[in-house]
Amino acid sequence: MRFVCLVALAACAPRLAPPPTAPARPPSPTPTASPLTPPPAAERVADRVRPRGDELGTMWTFENPPLDRWQRRYGFRPSPAWLERVRLAALRFDESCSAAFVSPDGLAMTNHHCVRECVEAVTRPGERLVEEGFLASRREDERICPELYLDQLVGWEDVTAQVETAAPVAASDTQATRVRRQTADRLEEDCRRRTGLVCQVVELYRGGRYHLYRYRRYAPVALVFAPELQAGYFGGDEDNFTYPRFAVDVAFVRAYDGERPARTPVYLPLEIGGARDGDLVFVVGNPGSTSRLTTVAQVLFERAFRHPFLLDYLVGQKAVLERWVRRQPQLEGMVRTEIFSLENARKAYAGQYAALQDSLLLGRKIAWERDFRARVRADSTRARLYGDVWDRLAALQEEKLAVAPAAYLLRPDFLGGPLESLAQLVLRTARGQGDTAAARRQLAQAPPLDTALARDLLALRLDLASRWLPPEHPFRRAALRPGEAPAEAAARLLRTTRLLDVTTRQRWAAGAADTAQDDLLRLVALMDSLGRPAQARWQALQAEEAAQQARLARALFAAYGTAVPPDATFTLRISDGVVRGYPYNGTQAPARTTFYGLFDRALAFGQRPPWNLPPRYLAGRNALDLATPLNFVATTDITGGNSGSPVVDRQGRVVGVAFDSNVEGLAHEFLFLGENGRTVAIHTAAVLEALRVVYRADALTRELVQAARAAPPVP
């Protein structure tokens, strides 16, 4: 079963009150203040700070590596051969993670949480691979992960001119967006025919540039090693986005060419000793998305609507799934990964939402925007072309605040609620819309509904409506009787509807009965009539915003050139930083943790979940070198999608695998602050120590060590 989710994480929420860890919402603004008006405290911060120049972060594309910056900061200027090797060895892992080849025989290293769906998929009857882990001691024991693939970036070209000039000058924003997308599709298809590669037109700088990326796709991909869930996800959601950490979040897969392992002569060898304090390191991976090239007004829209709305949604969706699993525990494996994803997304959005209340972040965002606008105004051509873009984007945010709740909540397919979807099918068939013969067959053959799940999803919709639609909204007034709670309304609608009766559905679909006599059908009909114009306007607003965002991106180029990186787009980036601890909780977080800390944390909690160690670790305690570094932090810039990214040193050798950000780094969604935000990674010394001692993975350890010794140096 797959549930509809509004977020990509990743990274990608009926008790619907935010959990204790969710941040409290800020007080409502005064009646005369717009939610899109910056708080006075943030304005005061903006008056005191100066832009540093790295507000857009350090997620550099390989088209424009900042060689001079690296030379100035670190005394390091990588050669073209170094850049090519780390680019070709780094991989995009399916649609959500990153990885890297670490041997010439197609072996790739990534995170445990990235292969979790594969582990579920290759589990055979009687096995518990998620709980107990998996190790292929021989090549023939490796198991193919269904539909998994690895993408290697082999080249690119700038197609900005073709995409931008495709739309007629007189085209509306919506038409121009559609034409550009059609042009991008044609470029991708032509590239595929010419090269046989996977091709993707990537929008960089939010429409300021378009590049055509060419990927070699490796498939099939087999699972080689994954630790137990309790080792890879040690600390669970409690420790997620925190540091110090003690997770063995690593896994290995192998790319195949037919029935043989793929030959991958370009790979990143492991540095056996791993990372040391103060080392220069680079994260090479595919960050999913960031919102740094947005205006202050757009960030305030996130604060006023999108982030708190998504928090409510994520908490509610997770509660629905957990209740479903409690009723049918035998199906827990079907949604375990999705529950983990919801937990991860909720905690990420909660951290970002907390950052949006921080006057320091908003103040720095305001200060950077002031500097940007001043650069545009300083040149008459720039001012004429782009001077009004901020005001236009601000006006769009005001209208989005009014339209967004209905555009989301009045979509019948929102949340994947089966009652609403079935009711919509009945209504459209009765009206003669679409293929009525096929719809009638579908209505006749529809399987029995899980009524408890259907009720919970309907209750979630009604609860969100009660929070986000104004009291006088027609849908809210029709759905909820005076004094009626959303869960009570959902139960009433389910109890009184005839929609669950197949014969009645068929009569309604044929137009043989008055569907208006059914409260649920009447509510869905109202939802449809109110929702369609709201969704049409929402799409138009998005198209207008995209057009203005592209103007903003062109203004950025005019003012800064390529001295700043684009927002993340789940395409390959390289980010620089150093291994370094940071102050937290009134003390200091060390740059590295050790296996000593892993056992201490487990024993301090009395082996209570989620801090309980798997039996293998308890049995191997005396054989492990407990002083071995386990996790470490670096000042590199990452976000969701970077999971599984190799962390490499000056020699282009892997010293770790990135698997998380700390809480302080969540604010980097909107602006790169730098100070205490960190990449959290597993140390290569820990990987080899665990493989050797805990899992006795002799063949895998030997392959990694031999590949490291055989790798030629890069000039």
Image: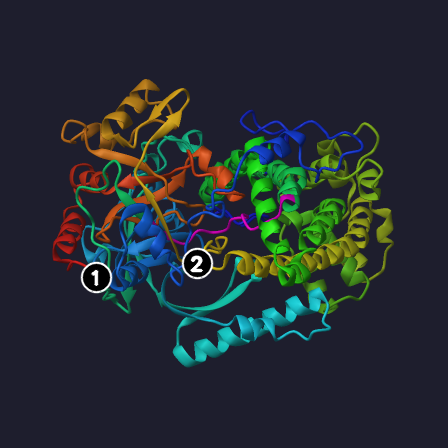
Residue under numbered circle 1: 105
- Secondary structure, mark 1, is loop
Q: Quadrant of residue 620?
A: top left
511 to the left or right of 344: right
Name the residue at 26% across, 67% down: 259
Label 2 close to label 1 by CB (< 8 Å):
no
Q: Is residue 599 above or below residue 705?
A: above
203 to the left or right of 171: left
Majority secondary structure in the magenta region: loop
**How many badges with numbers are in the image?**
2
Instruction: Give percent across and percent down for residue 534.
Output: 77, 53
Q: Residues within 10 Å of mark 1 (few under 14, many from 20)?
A: some
Q: Is residue 603 above or below residue 264?
A: above
Quick check: can you spot residue 358?
A: no
Residue 286 among magenta residues = yes
- Secondary structure, mark 2, is loop
Precedes in sequence: disc 2 or disc 1: 1
**Camera-nearest residue between 380 and 371:** 380
Magenta stretch in the rendered image: 283-296
Residue under numbered circle 2: 571
Quadrant containing the C terminus in the rendered view: bottom left
Residue 72 among magenta residues = no
Q: Nearer the viewer, mark 2 or mark 1?
A: 2
Q: Residues within 10 Å of mark 2 (few under 14, many from 20)?
A: many
Q: What is the residue that sits farthest to the bottom in this orientation?
A: 194
Instruction: Give percent across and percent down for residue 271.
Output: 19, 47
Inspect the image, locate mark 1, and give the three-letter code of the amino acid beneath it: Asp
Question: How far separated are the C-alphas under marks 2 and 1?
Answer: 24 Å
